[in-house]
Image (cartoon, rainbow, N blue to C red):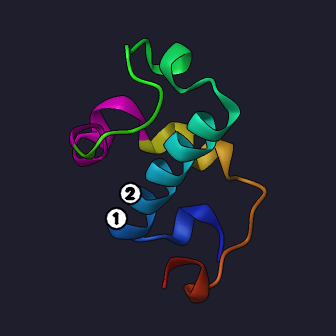
Amino acid sequence: MNVNELNRDQLTTLKQRYAFELADEGTFAEVFDLDIDEPSYMFLSLIDNFVSDEFIKEYYSYVWFTEEDFA
């Protein structure tokens, strides 16, 4: 399935994975203009305020997913 077929929980999971990718790259604080280097529980709970659905759909537009990706 493509990113446009994902449900709300799956989109949220992708947003959180994106945040962790940035932390692994060392760019999390810069991209989100925060004084922390990795996502906190508070950040993850408010992920929709930081990462839009539209951005995630564009970012993952060339990726095909399976149910196992979200298990």
Mark 1 neighbour density, 10 Å: few (under 14) some (14–19) many (20 or more): few
Label 1 sits on a secondary structure element that is helix
Relative image position of residue 24 (x, y in whole percent): 64, 40
Residue 63 at what x, y percent from top left? 75, 62
- The residue that mark 2 highlights is 12
Q: Residue at x 64, y 42 (%)?
A: 58
- Residue highlighted by disc 1: 8
- Residues under labels 2 and 1: Cα distance? 6 Å
Q: Which residues are magenta?
A: 42-52
Q: Is residue 59 magenta?
A: no
Q: Nearer the viewer, residue 13 or 35?
A: 35
From what the image shows, is residue 47 above or below residue 35? below
Q: Is residue 10 above or below residue 52?
A: below
Instruction: Choose mark 2 or mark 1, whichever is in front.
Output: 2
Query: In the displayed structure, does residue 47 sit left or right of residue 70?
Result: left
User: Among all residues in the image, which is located at the extreme right?
Assistant: 62
Q: Secondary structure at mark 2?
A: helix
Q: Residues within 10 Å of mark 2 (few under 14, many from 20)?
A: many
Q: Residue at x 39, y 38 (%)?
A: 39
User: Which numbered circle lies on residue 51?
Assistant: none
Q: Is residue 68 left or right of residue 37?
A: right
- Residue 23 point in image, percent of width and height: 57, 36
